[in-house]
Image (cartoon, helix red, strand yellow):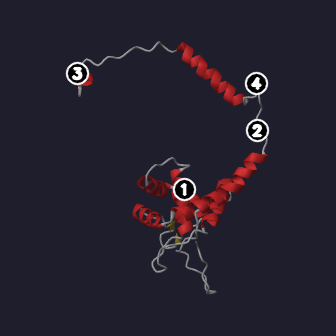
Amino acid sequence: MFVPPSSPIPSPSWIPAPPTRVDTRDAAQVRSLVAELAAVPDPRARKGRRFTLASLLVLAVCAMTSAGNDSLTAAAEWCQRATHQELAAFELPYDVSTARFRVPSEKTLRRVLGLLDPTEVSAAGFAYLRPLLQQAARTPPGPRTPDGLMEREQRRAHRRAKDEDVSAPRRRALAVDGKCLRGARPS
């Protein structure tokens, strides 16, 4: 997070200003998730912290869910490729000398996530999801057909049935290379 200088002396022109934050719906959701995950206690020592625990957790959640990554290595690579606006939403520290947001490495993500208590992280995640689920329950469902199915589901079922009718009949496969005999004993 960029902290303006406390002195009245103007900063030199060679120091770039941090990028302006673009308030979109996604950025607002990320900020609300950061605020909710701030309740998770940080097991790290105070000395040497570069990133807040909430920022690291939100980075991992967004990289694993919305970006579709399935490992911490891929999540760290996703963080390296993220835009300035995305990184600003995660409330990462801004480095004035390089004019970039600091991004955690894979080692940092792995070490910090390994220290956490899963029940506390789950509780904070459910506290974030609970209002979203209640809001989704209040919204009326989409259009329904006379037999009670949602229209979209009925279209999917119709396509599935149509695809199954057109498909070729299944053939029976036989192994002729002896693999089905492996482990067989004469009777």
Seen at 21% across and 24% down, the residue is: 185
Viewer-proximal residue, 86 or 114? 114
Give coordinates of residue 155: x percent, y percent.
67, 25
Alpha-carbon distance for marks 3 and 4? 52 Å
Q: Are marks 3 and 4 in contact (CB under 8 Å)?
A: no
- Callout 2: SS: loop
Q: How many marks?
A: 4
Mark 3 — residue? 178
Mark 4 — residue? 147
Query: What kind of residue is marked 3?
Result: Gly
Alpha-carbon distance for marks 4 and 2? 15 Å
- Callout 3: SS: loop
Viewer-proximal residue, 85 or 175? 175
User: Does residue 176 appear left or right of residue 106 in this picture?
Assistant: left
Query: What kind of residue is marked 2?
Result: Pro
**On screen, residue 124 above or below 155:** below
User: Does residue 26 appear left or right of residue 46 in this picture?
Assistant: right
Q: In the rendered structure, find residue 61 and report the number of the disc placed on it.
A: 1
Mark 2 — residue? 141
**On screen, residue 112 above or below 65:** below
Q: Residues within 10 Å of mark 2 (few under 14, many from 20)?
A: few
Alpha-carbon distance for marks 4 and 1? 39 Å
Give coordinates of residue 115: x percent, y percent.
45, 67
- Callout 4: SS: loop
Is residue 41 something one can see in this rendering? yes
Alpha-carbon distance for marks 1 and 3? 47 Å
Give coordinates of residue 80: x percent, y percent.
46, 58
The numbered mark, 4 or 2, whose residue comes first in the sequence reads 2
